[in-house]
């Protein structure tokens, strides 16, 4: 358990406002100020700077913030490990982005449950930004994500490298001969919502060609990969998805890969946890086991 002053510090970092932090912690604003002053005296450095009505972290404050987040995460794991020593269940609490959770994890999790039938698994599916917040708050141990993350704050391993491909229905009728991504701009684009990993990868690729999603003449934003695949199979448009997400449909023939000469995109699924965690060895064991390597978990 973190020192109560450190919890106050983290809450101020979250709100960047002493009064709001006091409200969340159910203490007075002078108490919040007292906790922060005590930490500044202990570490011998100012943690916040006041710029008018705005509050920002100093360099020392950012360093302490990062370390405190890791300490809070480790404290939760210490409690879990002690519970296991007294006969508690094995717990696996982690996050995954939508594509990872739906198409990369079922097989490894099934194998894990066969080996640990009494275990309690909790996999939370959300976008990368939300999962990073859950790691920071100690709500999950680690995450497997397709999105980008600050490597200065998280340690990571490449879980897998996946192909990102354009697909359409088996009998889709293109408006023109298709060779380049520009040839698809007259088609309806079936795309995930803003903030999703697959959309961000497509946006990044298009930016490199001086294009935007808005350049497609027609668009449909769909928050479900299954729905996007069904619409594409029904001939309602073209889409860009990880090959892992459409492998079955490609094999069955309901979807086909669109042969573009200028589209060769690969992206990593990353296994991440808080940087400098005391439990790094544990995360590396879980990583190896999920990949099918013979490591005890």
Image: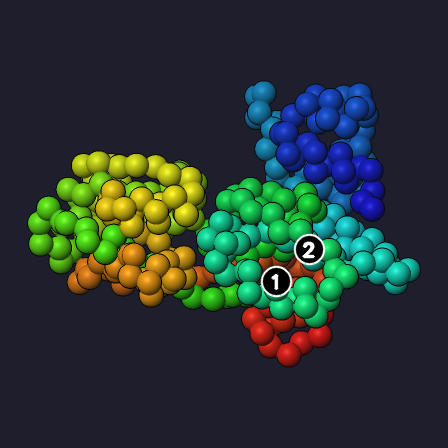
Residue 141 in percent (x, y) is at 67, 54
Q: Residues within 10 Å of mark 2 (few under 14, many from 20)?
A: some
Secondary structure beneath dot 1 equals: helix
Q: How crowded is mark 1: few (under 14 residues within 10 Å), some or many (20 or more)?
A: some
Residue 140 in percent (x, y) is at 67, 50
Q: In which quarter of the image is the C terminus?
A: bottom right
Front residue of this view, candidates 178 and 274: 178
Q: In this view, does 275 lie to the left or right of 216?
A: right
According to the image, what is the colour scheme of the structure?
rainbow
Give how far apart the Cα atoms at labels 1 and 2 are.
Answer: 9 Å
Front residue of this view, candidates 37 and 19: 19
Q: In this view, does 184 lie to the left or right of 57?
A: left
Above or below, comparing residue 244 to residue 4 in the picture: below
Q: Name the residue under label 1.
A: 109
Name which residue lies at 58% across and 20% down.
Answer: 53
Farthest residue to the bottom: give it. Answer: 294
Above or below, comparing residue 83 to residue 184 in the picture: below
Q: Is residue 141 left or right of residue 220?
A: right
Name which residue lies at 68% across and 23% down.
Answer: 20
Cβ–Cβ under 8 Å for marks 1 and 2: yes
Q: Can residue 66 be seen in this view?
A: no
N-terminal of the pair, mark 1 or mark 2, is 1
Residue 286 in percent (x, y) is at 65, 67
Q: Name the residue under label 2.
A: 121
């Amino acid at each position: 358990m973190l020192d109560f002053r450190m919890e106050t510090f983290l809450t101020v970092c979250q709100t960047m406002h002493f009064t709001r932090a006091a409200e969340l912690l159910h203490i007075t604003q002078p108490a919040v100020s007292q906790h922060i002053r005590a930490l500044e005296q202990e570490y011998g450095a100012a943690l916040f700077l006041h710029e008018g009505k705005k509050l920002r972290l100093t360099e020392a404050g950012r360093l302490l913030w990062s370390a405190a987040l890791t300490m809070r995460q480790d404290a939760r794991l210490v409690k879990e490990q002690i519970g296991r020593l007294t006969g508690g269940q094995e717990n696996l609490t982690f996050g995954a982005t939508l594509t990872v959770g739906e198409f990369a994890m079922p097989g490894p999790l099934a194998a894990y449950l066969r080996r640990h039938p009494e275990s309690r698994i909790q996999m939370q599916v959300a976008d990368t930004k939300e999962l990073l917040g859950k790691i920071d708050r100690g709500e999950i141990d680690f995450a497997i994500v397709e999105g980008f993350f600050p490597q200065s704050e998280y340690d990571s391993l490449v879980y897998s490298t996946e192909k990102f491909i354009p697909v359409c229905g088996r009998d889709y009728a293109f408006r023109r001969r298709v060779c380049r991504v520009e040839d698809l701009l007259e088609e309806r684009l079936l795309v995930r919502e803003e903030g999703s990993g697959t959309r961000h990868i497509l946006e990044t690729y298009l930016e490199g060609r001086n294009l935007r999603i808005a350049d497609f003449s027609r668009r449909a934003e769909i928050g479900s990969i299954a729905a996007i695949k069904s619409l594409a199979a029904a001939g309602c448009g073209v889409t860009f998805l990880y090959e892992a997400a459409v492998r079955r449909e490609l094999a069955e023939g309901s979807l086909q890969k669109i042969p573009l000469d200028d589209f060769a995109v690969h992206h990593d699924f990353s296994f991440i946890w808080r940087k400098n965690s005391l439990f790094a060895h544990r995360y590396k064991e879980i990583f190896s086991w999920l990949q099918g390597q013979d490591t005890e978990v």
